[in-house]
Image (tube, coloured by chain):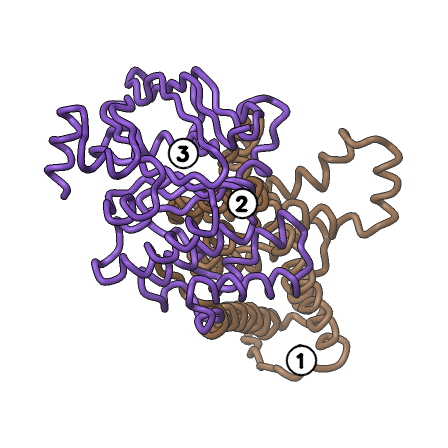
Amino acid sequence: MTEVKYTFDWNLVLTGQYGDWMLQGLLLTLKISAVSIVLAMLMGTIVAVFRLSKVRPLIWFSAGYTEFFRNTPLLVQIFFWYFGSEAVLPKAVNTWLYKQDFEFAAGCIALTVYTSAFIAEEIRSGIFAIPKNQLEASRAVGLSFIQSYRYVILPQAFRIIIPPLISQFLNLIKNSSLVMTIGVADLTYMARQVESYTFHGFESFTVATLIYLAISLVVSFTITMYNKHFLRQITY
Amino acid sequence: MPVIEVNKLNKWYGDFHVLKDINQTVEKGEVLVICGPSGSGKSTFIRCVNRLEEYQKGEVLFNGQDIQAKSVNVNQLRADIGIVFQQFNLYPHLTVLKNITLAPLKVKKTPRNQAEENGLALLERVGIHDQAHKYPAELSGGQQQRVAIARALAMRPQVMLFDEPTSALDPEMINEVLNVMKDLAREGMTMLCVTHEMGFAREVADRVIFMDSGIIVEEAPPDVFFNNPKHDRTKAFLKEIL
């Protein structure tokens, strides 16, 4: 029996048609990550503030939301939004969704909801670290509860939780590779596709790995530098 | 009509009866000094006046209006009744000027240039206009407390509450804060001050109130209060602190 020798061909996966696929995949990964991070921060903030409000139903909603989405597998959630949402949504909404990029939307929702449950907990712990009298001082000059959070409490809480928030962002970026399972043509999906056309899986997945690593390092470095140079460190 | 009228005010923390049938009438421009041992309810009393504490029985009227009535907008009430805390409580992530302009910008919707102009004028008044763009942590305690006073004044309140404003300060900084408060008093501000600065009380107070165990034990103009107190508890307290 003769052994077929594997010859490395990096150019093959980096140029031409295959290179384009990898690039498209990269752009889609960046897009779904960016959109989901923004939405997850918004949702996480809302859920965290609900939890600290004095309105019972909001507290229950928030507690249920965090516990439910934090404790179920992301892949199951992705499948749920992709395969399951059809059954509960009105027909008109479904028709409209199918005209849009439905896979992208389902993936985005799953990543947002899942990550926001973790982010909400980070924000909540950040808020707990702010002295109580900050809220009292801002309420005492006439700011409403929402205004106090918007201008006094949250800006301080976010500064405190920047390091754990970075971890959440990096998790989301890496978790976004799971959306390939519902046909979103992200970086992982494209690497897989290049592999099946060329049988050069070692190269395509090495490239994908290095790209994920690069994105994570850039995100982490940028936020850390921004925090260090542009945000005032708070002391009480 | 008195600015503030307190009728049979009662408050409990659980089973603990903090305020017992407090009655007070404060006319416009009056300066009250409230003193008493810790735990006597003096801070709780003034914090009821701007609803930082809710009370269970009796009433507090501000310009004749019951402040715990459903129709009262609590944010508006607090804009009209400023408070200065023992621990300054400045916003550490904002500059001195932004500490002052935040509430006028967001609550009163004052245009930015006007809010800043007013803020700088207030800083001038409390003697620290050159620190406008610094952060609270870069200021001394006395300076921070003066910023806190300017922040409360920026809402143009009708009444100012002071909750032990000099207790957290190093001794050499107490006077710079007291001087600002004395100026305010002379300019006609209605003030309720919880403080043990008896020099301040002698100089500007219209009335001095001594509280103990949730009760107003004694109430008199400063010269009578200090020279001729009636109650033994007041005498004992004055002996301790003078």
Quarter holding residue B118: bottom right
- Labels 3 and 2 within one chain: yes
To which chain does the residue with label 3 belong? B
The residue tagged 3 is B47
Q: Residue at x 47, y 25 (%)?
A: B5
In the rendered image, the quadrant that contains the C terminus of chain A is bottom left
The residue tagged 2 is B157
Name the side, left or right, on which B122 lies relative to B233.
Answer: right
Secondary structure state at the residue bearing disc 2: loop
Separation of residues labelled 3 and 2 (CA atoms):
15 Å
Secondary structure state at the residue bearing disc 3: helix
The residue tagged 1 is A14
To which chain does the residue with label 1 belong? A
In the rendered image, the quadrant that contains the N terminus of chain A is bottom right
Quarter holding residue B40: top left
From the image, state the color of chain A: brown
Q: Position of residue A10 (x, y in %)?
A: 61, 82
Q: Amino acid at mark 1?
A: Leu
Q: Is residue A48 visible?
A: no
- Labels 2 and 1 within one chain: no
Name the side, left or right, on which B236 lies relative to A1.
Answer: left
Q: Amino acid at mark 3?
A: Arg
